[in-house]
Image (spheres, rainbow, N blue to C red):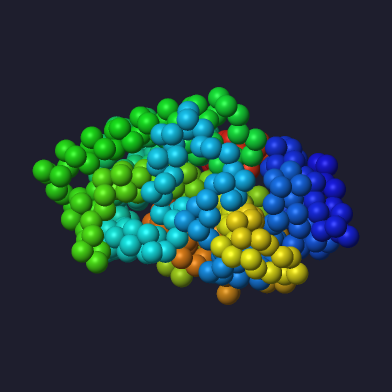
Amino acid sequence: MTLIIDAARRSVRLDPRDPAFFGDPYPAYAAIRAAAPAFFWDDYGLWCFAPHRDVSALLRDKRFGRQILHVMSREALGWPAPKDHLAPFDALERHSILELEPPEHTRLRGLVNRAFVSRRIETLGPRIAALAHEQINAFGRRGSADLIADFAAPIPVAVIADLIGVPGEMGPQMLDWSHRMVAMYQFGVTRAVEESAAEAARAFAGFMRAHARARRSDLRDDLISQLLRAESDGGRLSEDELVTTCILLLNAGHEATVHAIGNGVKAMLEHHVDAESAFAGEASRAATVEEMLRLDAPLHLFARYALEDVEFAGVRFKKGEKIGLLLGAANRDPDRFPRPDAFDARRDPNPHLAFGAGIHFCVGAPLARLEMATALPILFARLPGLRLVETPQYRDAYHFHGLEALRVTWG
């Protein structure tokens, strides 16, 4: 790995596409945190923050936001005109809860909370357990498996499809659309990636729009139906907002959870965690899941914009400047987490930032936690002696952090 830290200038050169980095970013994080905790990442062209105290504070700081075009024009920011070929993708981004600030964010988040963070989540445990057993039944007799393809990927997409109210058989197609769209958030996006993401966005939106229109005359007990019924301050979701919200939840509802499950199993196996003890009782299961999320989070970089001229950690930002928050680095900060590189299932407190914080705290966090706390104890109980057959490799997809495959055997 080529890591160049200029402590005097508070700058770092580090290629996010370097396999040595995205395969194990934590040594680089530790070196950066020690030398320049607030640093200018030359490769990205923005200031970034690595300490837990800074990342936690900036996630909650209302002087920064996910959106900037509500307070500045593209011309004032020096941005080029939107790319015509990205219009379908940009149309979805325009209504995404993740990219909005109050008051639009407040209205949409309130509607989604009514539908998504509800007693319905608590009832999904048996469905998740059944899916876990179903997947293990399918590969259990083989004696080996790729737990990403055979376990971690199928369960979250089936659960979120059920919750939202889209046909389960659409799972593979939605996965394809999602992967192509999510590729837009990675470093070094090419024209081919942009065109693929735009086409996926067009197709996904067309499917979701038609499905929602059909559901208007056949309301059921699912998220689409609840959103169609929902009102906040007398205002319904527009159809564009509903389509975007469902796509965002489908994408986020499985993409990060797949990585969280894969990374978590890998961590337990590499750290030789006793699964019987770790999953003994509800409290232990919950604590183990939180430690998985802290130790090897699925999202490592979260960007925000300065909404006004502001100074933070000795760095002055002009209105419109973009900053990066290193969630993965914050979760391994020794000033906040004793023995940060160790897997400690009894860690208490465990204020990790894997789900973010502030108004953009992950709306799907309760579901992700339930999926992990339900499916993983079943996996380890059904496959005693679970162990790795090769060193897992991470995907070239920074700032997402997930495995290409997780090949295991047991018995």
Quarter of the image where the C terminus is located: top right
**Residue 80 x %, y %:** 58, 39
Which of 232/27 is in front? 232
Where does the image place residue 20, in percent across and percent down from the top left?
A: 75, 40
> At 88% across and 60% down in the image, what residue appears?
8
Q: Evaluate whether residue 58 shows in this view.
A: yes
Q: Relative to residue 122, is residue 228 depicted above or below?
A: above
Name the residue rendered at 47%, 56% in the picture: 70
Q: From the image, which quarter does the N terminus lie in?
A: top right
Instruction: Please state if 333 lies on the left or on the right of 10 as rendered.
Output: left
Q: Of all residues shown, which one is farthest toward the front?
A: 75
Q: Residue at x 40, y 42 (%)?
A: 92
Q: Could you say which quadrant of the image residue 48 lies in?
A: bottom right
Residue at left 54%, top 47%?
74
Horizontally, is 11 left or right of 376 in the view?
A: right
- Nearest the viewer among 395 and 362 is 362
Examine the rendering and report whether any part of residue 172 can be seen.
Answer: no
Q: Is residue 181 above or below residue 59?
A: above
Residues 191 and 183: in front is: 191
Residue 117: x and y in percent read: 33, 62
